Image (spheres, helix red, strand yellow):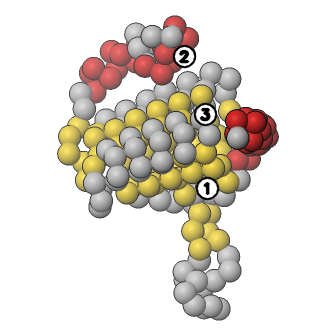
Amino acid sequence: MIVINLYKRLEFWILLKIWLIRFQKLWKNSIVKYGLFWNPERIIIEEYVYIWENCNFWGLGWITIASGTICWPNIIIRSSNHNYKSWDYLPYGPWVESRPVKVWKNCWIWDSVLIAPWTQIWEWVIIWMWSVVSWEIPAYSIEVWNPWKVIKTRDIDIYNTLKEEDKIYIKNKILWNI
């Protein structure tokens, strides 16, 4: 039993390594736990990004995660959708529409969030757990629920001060093990 579990773990880590090699860009100071990354050659993960376990990224339409962003477990990001406007078949046609997703710097995407195609999440945004996000989340905001709504805007002066002092949590955690 223990031997089988060790073998499965080893097999899993080998498969994970193969997936990580195929990312379009994965900076060396980022941490990506296990998950499903479809079309990883169209996923860009910048420096000092932390992606927790069991995340599911569908990268057909390009996904970019900017530096300083933290993604907690069970996040789903879709960058494509079936063509529901098809005149050929019901309920949708055989082709897929690609739509990019961009998460800007220093965001915190909490547990079990679904991000729809063609979404932009601007700088220093917090997305609360179990939210469904589509279109555009304004910078410095805290977003909650389904359908999403902004409940608070964060202080831009604090953000600029912390950014100038290079007090980015995940960067300091990786570099200095805080």
Q: Quadrant of residue 20?
A: top right
Location of residue 94 with respect to 52 vertically, above or below? below
Q: Amino acid at mark 2?
A: Ile
Q: Which residue is mark 2?
A: 174
* Mark 1 or 3, nearer chain start: 3
Q: Secondary structure at mark 2?
A: helix
CA separation in Å, label 2 and label 3? 12 Å
Q: Secondary structure at mark 1?
A: strand
* Mark 2 or 1, nearer chain start: 1
Instruction: Give the residue at x 27% y 49%.
Output: 144
Instruction: Give the residue at x 48% y 32%.
Output: 69
Q: Nearer the viewer, mark 1 or mark 3?
A: 3
Q: Which residue is mark 3?
A: 32
Is any atom of residue 122 visible in this view? no
Q: Position of residue 15 (x, y in %)?
A: 76, 42
Q: Quadrant of residue 135?
A: bottom left
Please state if 100 lies on the left or on the right of 75 as rendered. Answer: right
Q: Amino acid at mark 1?
A: Trp
Position of the C terminus, as image quadrant, is: top left
- Which dot marks residue 146? none
Q: Position of residue 23 (x, y in %)?
A: 72, 41
Q: Residues within 10 Å of mark 3 (few under 14, many from 20)?
A: some
- Which dot marks residue 58? 1
Q: Secondary structure at mark 3?
A: strand
Nearer to me, 29 or 137: 29
